[in-house]
Image (cartoon, rainbow, N blue to C red):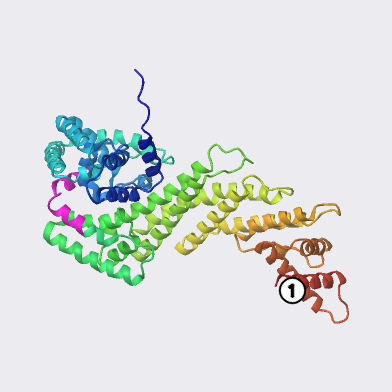
Amino acid sequence: MTDAPPDPLRSKIDALVNRLPSSLVYSLLSEIEGMDGEPTDRVQLVRQYVIEFLNRQRTNRARRLFTNLFEAFLIDDDVLYHSGVAIPGMVQRVDAGALWELLSRDSFPLLAVEAQELLDEMARGDVIDRVLKSPVAMVLRERMRVAAIKHLDAQLAAKKTTDELLAGLSRNRPRRTRLMSGFLEKTPPVDVGSLRLMHAILTGADGPIKLVAERLDGFAASAHASEAEHNRKADALVEATEALRERCGDEAANLLPLSVLSVHRNYGVIALYIRQSGVDPGRGDVVTAALTGHFIGVTRALTAALNVILKLNERVPGSAIRPSAKEKARLEALTERLVELSHAAAAAGLMEDRRSEPAFRNAWGNASKIIGARVAAVAMERSGQAAAARRQPVIDHADVVWLDRLLWRWQSMTRDFGFETYDLVKWRDTLLEEMRANVEKAMKFEENDPLDERMEHLLRINELSGVFGQRVSAWIPTFSQNMTTLLSHRLERVRDRSPEEQAIIDDLVATARAEVGKSRYWKSNELMDLIELSDRASRAAS
């Protein structure tokens, strides 16, 4: 029996919607469904194909229906697994999925099959997002919720059964987190706090938890929020939390700021909330514990990522570094997140309390040992080779510049956070000395050496030293014959010079002017010719 030939219309629809963002695909479907008049058979067919395209990668529909109970509080944040501590208020999506696997096997296996078959049938004629909000789906979800609560009540009643349940959930974590992160060596086990939180969310889904979810959206982070906006939201968060505490108790009340922290990552508002709510950092407050866990997790995730990306444990000396664009973006995002957390810890007053400060200092110190020693050593080695490359750039020149920038950014962060040790300052000074030595070598050339190649070499060194605000022009002596030869060649022969090259030329010409101006009676002919040539080039350019 041969397969039926592919439908040309289906192929066209798949090719079209595959190029569109999902939001525009939904808009396309709405336009199709809103067409005037009775839809033709062809329009109905197009609608069906679009629905099938949207549904085809979302096949675990019963699981999705169940985990929607946690949706307002779910996070996909593998960084927090690096913290090594239990983080209050954290509900990872992978853990909700693991809970589904255990419950669908041990608590309601027949209901899970019934729900999957019914949702599959309903998804034949509509997109799964609408199906999951239908009255039929809501009834199924409620049945699963009730069965889950009954099962968890029994399991949590005794330590032995609780430990067995935690062990089952923890066995699912490594398999699932491998899909999320390539930098996590060992996945921590699921802690009982996370399990009890999921139980509380199920239990209070139509009561306290619903109230928390309704208030949570108002505290989303904004990239350009002003200080006044942060203060306004912090005041509102304090009021909303206290209102929930009076009405629903501590568990539901604490979930609101914890979710603002973990779901929205609104670190600025949480810092002000801690300060304004009069929390004592040294007395085990859940919000300060969660913020501390975020800080530790991000610092450890940053060093773990550097270890993997730079292959610190198996690196061959002299080998190039080749981080991908995705890996660079990952490291830069972690760095930015750490900056936000550093400001939040300081604003919350956690750095002023001798009981809370050591956790931050230790986490930063451990990261600094790796970055200031092992990562800096790689950067020093590669920067030296990049600066010494006389004829053509090393294959990882751009990556070396990027790594130098990352290290110097870390130094700036360390200084701002009050943990400066000057290790990277000494590293910078040593590196610049090597750059200077390579500039001297670059300026030594024979009469037949290609002058354009010499300037390209200087520009490569300048790119490396420019990370630290240093231009190579400061290392080239005014009376260097080779300097005037090189600059004269570039001014005469090259019209389209880069801004970096022009800045070097301007520096050296300005130094030449100053040198010529020192003597009233004697002028260097070479320097005068260079100055005149520079002036002509400037007039021609303007």
Residue type at the position of mark 1:
Arg
> What range is drawn magenta here?
195-214
The answer to which of 257 and 494 lies nearer the viewer is: 494
- Residue beneath the point at 63% across and 47% down: 382
Q: Residues within 10 Å of mark 1 (few under 14, many from 20)?
A: few
User: Does 209 appear in magenta?
Assistant: yes
| Image position of 541 with respect to 376: above or below | below
**Quadrant of the drawing holding the C terminus:** bottom right
| Disc 1: which residue | 539
Residue 423: image x %, image y %? 56, 56
Question: How many numbered discs sit on the rendered protein?
Answer: 1
- Residue beneath the point at 32% across and 39% down: 53
Q: Main secondary structure of the magenta part?
A: helix
Res. 278 visible in picture: yes
Residue 386: image x %, image y %? 66, 49
- Residue beneath the point at 29% across and 51% down: 31
- Residue beneath the point at 22% across and 33% down: 102
**Quadrant of the drawing holding the N terminus:** top left
User: Does 446 appear in magenta?
Assistant: no
Residue 421: image x %, image y %? 52, 58
- In the figure, residue 11 lies in which quadrant? top left
Residue 290: image x %, image y %? 30, 53
In the image, 227: left or right of 168?
right
Please tell me whether mark 1 sits on a helix, a strand or a loop: helix
The answer to which of 210 and 33 lies nearer the viewer is: 33
Res. 90 visible in picture: no
Which residue extends farthest bottom? 520
